[in-house]
Amino acid sequence: MAVNRVTPKCPLYFKRFYVYFEELKRGWKEGCRPILGLDDYFLKG
């Protein structure tokens, strides 16, 4: 993450923000997906 200031007294603002989407997908598959699978079971009922 990069932050810039125009002058020392100005508030901070973001210049860049980086998110690694592959890690988010892996976390979703390993963490949240099994919970939704249980919900799906009850919906098929």
Image (cartoon, rainbow, N blue to C red):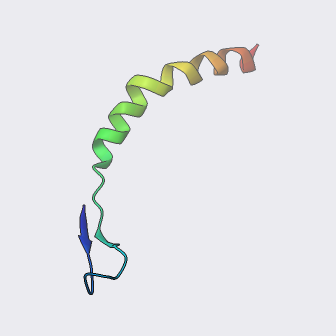
In the foreground, 45 or 36: 36
Residue 29 point in image, percent of width and height:
40, 29
Vertical arrangement, residue 5 with respect to residue 39, above or below = below
Q: Quadrant of the N terminus?
A: bottom left
**Residue 34 position in % (x across, y down):** 50, 19
Is 35 rendered above or below residue 9?
above
The x, y position of residue 42, in whole percent, is 72, 15
Q: Nearer the viewer, residue 13 or 41?
A: 13
Question: Which residue is nearer to you in this view: 15 or 35?
Answer: 15
In the rendering, at what x and y percent does residue 41 appear? 66, 15
Outermost residue on the bottom side: it is 7
Residue name at image x 34 percent, y 82 percent: 10
In the image: residue 8, left or right of residue 10: left
Q: In the image, what residue occupies the spot 27% across and 86% down? A: 6
User: Which image quarter is the C terminus in?
Assistant: top right
Left-right relation of 19 to 36: left
Q: How many marks can you see?
A: 0
Q: Quadrant of residue 44?
A: top right
> Which residue reaches farthest front?
9
Q: Residue at x 29, y 39 (%)?
A: 23
- Examine the rendered structure and indicate whether residue 38 appears above or below residue 33: above
Name the residue rendered at 74%, 21% in the picture: 43
Q: Based on the displayed image, in which of its 4 quarters is residue 5 positioned?
A: bottom left
